[in-house]
């Protein structure tokens, strides 16, 4: 093994022809003989280069509609042979195998074929067999062979040839080999995923194939001493990971995490009237609907103006100038919207550090899997895409909710499913009045939400907190009547909760004693 290996023969077989012209020109300039297959061979000839067809190399024609063409000892022997091993060299001479020093391979576009909704037969036909075999052979023998799997690698490779008189350095070959094995692993994961989820309809296959591609290195993780990166799935992305940043500083790990929660929450009002959500540390601190976007923002902000400082704001309609002006009154980390008009962009342009993201609102009921690492393993569950309709709720108290209470109950319930457990949400008039999040006791969450409403009223100069006459949502059942009683003392008139406690009767009795209306959804929304 030597550090520098001259390139004398190259095998090229690519489905993506981008960058092929300068690469071929560089190879020919260094006296490299070209061997190629099918469409790549035709493309090279069209560029004016002499090319040996792989069928000429192997002595066997391509057959079975191209399924069999490179699976031959004269291909894989040329890639796998150890040039410094006497037995390997003797075998090559005995069988007429010439060494191949460079393989340029990218694979059939399997993921793109799936993404465009092709029929099953086309998808199967786009599972590459010979390509991955050549990639793996080349990468395994990287002491002697270089492997290129992406046009993105061509410029650096061309520069290396120029710097080393047509040879490749070992460090580069090792780097390319690592990328090659990652490439085939991702490709196999895409095939296995399609078979498991799309073809076989499994939710939890025996082997969970996951392959992600690094999109960005982040400045740091949740804390400055932690490292972090953003990875994207194969076949395209959506949501926050695919958002377009119009301005502002680089997004941090915490920005992305909070922005994801904000977009997921505001998507509940996709296609509805104006709505706004404000997130802080992955929890909503204010959510509201309104007659206009600025009205929705003002109502959401009024719920907890202290926590809103430095928060993440998401709206469900394109931003306009008045809403941008209102948002700009305080420090905001990130604003997310499906669009922004010229007036809004002009307002935010004065806020150099504010990140403005444009993102399509995802379907809140979309399926999917949620992954969470634990020591020594991974927890996997289906995404919480459950929704409750009014018709599915059970009125369990003597008094049924009024029409206005029904509207606020369902609004509060929608918000509560996005709040960390234990979650309590007070709402009135299509806006949150107080949010209690992440407490070990449901009673504490109830009291904290009420306290925040009092603070908000004092800050706004209101005569009373908005919990007076409000409706309350609880993400899980009240284990005791104390939480409901605390909500009633704060001024709530109606409750929505899953039910299911062994003390449901006590809780219902407490509601009846206080004239509250209460409905059970039968669906819990823990969020940890």
Image (tube, helix red, strand yellow):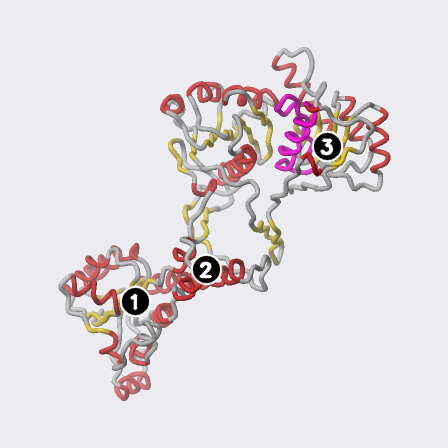
Distance in Å between CA atoms under marks 1 and 3: 64 Å
Asked which quadrant contains residue 46, the reply is: bottom left
Secondary structure of the residue carrying tag 2 is helix
Q: Which residues are magenta?
A: 404-433
Please tell me which residue lies in front, 53 or 199. Answer: 199
User: Which residue is at the front of the view, 266 or 392?
Assistant: 392
**Marks 3 and 1: in contact by CB < 8 Å?**
no
Q: Which of 381 and 367 lies nearest the eye of the viewer?
A: 367
Tell me the element at label 1: strand
Where residue 146 is drawn, which disc sits there? Answer: 1
Q: CA distance from mark 1 to mark 2?
A: 25 Å
Q: Is residue 424 magenta?
A: yes
Q: Position of residue 437 (x, y in %)?
A: 66, 33
Q: If you read the primary sequence from the N terminus, does the residue marked by circle 1 or circle 3 appear first?
A: 1
Question: Mark 2 highlights which residue?
Answer: 190
Q: Along the polypeptide, which appears first: circle 1 or circle 2?
A: 1
In this picture, residue 501 sits left or right of residue 266:
right
Q: Residues within 10 Å of mark 3 (few under 14, many from 20)?
A: many
Residue 294 falls within the magenta-colored stretch: no
**Mark 2 Cα shell of 10 Å, populated few (<14), some (14-19), many (≥20):** many
The disc, 3 or 2, on the residue closer to the chain's N-terminal end is 2
Q: Residue 151 location in percent, x, y? A: 29, 56
Query: In the picture, which quadrant includes the C terminus?
Result: top right
Q: Nearer the viewer, mark 1 or mark 3?
A: 3
Mark closer to the observer (3, 2): 3
Secondary element under disc 3, as helix, strand or loop, is: strand
Q: Identify the residue at horizontal 65%, vertical 14% (top origin).
A: 458
Which residue: 58% across, 49% down? Answer: 370
Cα distance between the residues tagged 3 and 2: 42 Å
Could you tell me which quadrant the N terminus lies in? bottom left
| Label disc, if present, on residue 496 of the rendered structure | 3
């Amino acid at each position: 093994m030597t550090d520098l290996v001259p390139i004398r023969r190259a095998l090229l077989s690519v489905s993506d022809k981008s960058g092929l012209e300068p690469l071929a020109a560089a190879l020919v300039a260094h006296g490299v003989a070209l061997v190629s297959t099918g469409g790549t061979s035709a493309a090279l000839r069209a560029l004016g280069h002499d090319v040996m067809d792989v069928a000429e190399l192997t002595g066997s024609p391509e057959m079975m509609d191209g399924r069999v063409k490179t699976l031959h000892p004269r291909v894989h022997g040329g890639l796998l042979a150890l040039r410094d091993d006497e037995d390997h060299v003797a075998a090559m001479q005995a069988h007429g195998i010439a060494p191949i020093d460079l393989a340029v391979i990218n694979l059939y576009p399997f993921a793109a074929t799936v993404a465009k909704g092709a029929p099953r037969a086309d998808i199967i036909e786009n599972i590459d067999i010979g390509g991955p075999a050549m990639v793996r052979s080349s990468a395994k023998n990287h002491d002697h062979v270089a492997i290129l799997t992406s046009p993105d690698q061509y410029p650096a490779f061309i520069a290396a040839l120029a710097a080393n008189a047509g040879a490749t350095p070992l460090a580069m070959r090792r780097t390319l080999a690592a990328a090659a094995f990652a490439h085939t692993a991702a490709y196999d994961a895409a095939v296995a995923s399609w078979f498991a989820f799309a073809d076989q309809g499994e939710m939890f296959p025996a082997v969970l194939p996951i392959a992600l591609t690094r999109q960005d290195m982040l400045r740091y993780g949740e804390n400055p001493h932690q490292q972090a990166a953003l990875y994207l799935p194969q076949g395209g992305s959506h949501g926050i990971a695919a958002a377009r940043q119009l301005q502002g500083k680089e997004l941090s790990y915490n920005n992305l995490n909070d922005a994801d929660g904000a977009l997921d929450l505001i998507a509940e009002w996709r296609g509805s009237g104006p709505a706004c959500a404000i997130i802080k540390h992955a929890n909503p601190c204010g959510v509201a609907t309104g007659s206009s976007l600025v009205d929705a923002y003002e109502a959401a902000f009024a719920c907890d103006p202290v926590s809103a400082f430095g928060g993440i704001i998401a709206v469900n309609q394109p931003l306009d100038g008045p809403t941008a002006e209102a948002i700009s009154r305080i420090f905001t980390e990130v604003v997310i919207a499906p669009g922004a008009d010229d007036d809004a962009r002009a307002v935010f342009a004065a806020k150099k550090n504010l990140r403005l993201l444009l993102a399509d609102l995802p379907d809140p009921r979309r399926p999917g899997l949620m992954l969470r690492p634990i020591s020594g393993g991974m927890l996997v569950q289906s995404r919480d895409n459950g929704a409750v309709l009014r018709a599915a709720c059970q009125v369990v108290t003597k008094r049924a909710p009024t029409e206005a209470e029904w509207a606020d109950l369902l609004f509060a319930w929608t918000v509560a499913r996005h709040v960390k457990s234990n979650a309590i949400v007070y709402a009135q008039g299509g806006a949150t009045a107080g949010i209690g999040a992440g407490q070990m006791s449901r009673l504490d969450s109830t009291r904290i939400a009420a306290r925040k409403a009092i603070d908000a009223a004092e800050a706004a100069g209101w005569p009373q907190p908005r919990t007076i006459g409000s409706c309350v949502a609880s993400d899980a059942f009240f284990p005791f009547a104390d939480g409901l009683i605390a909500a009633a003392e704060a001024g709530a008139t109606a409750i929505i909760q899953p039910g299911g406690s062994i003390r449901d009767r006590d809780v219902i009795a407490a509601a009846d004693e206080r004239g509250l209306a209460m409905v059970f959804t039968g669906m819990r929304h823990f969020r940890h």
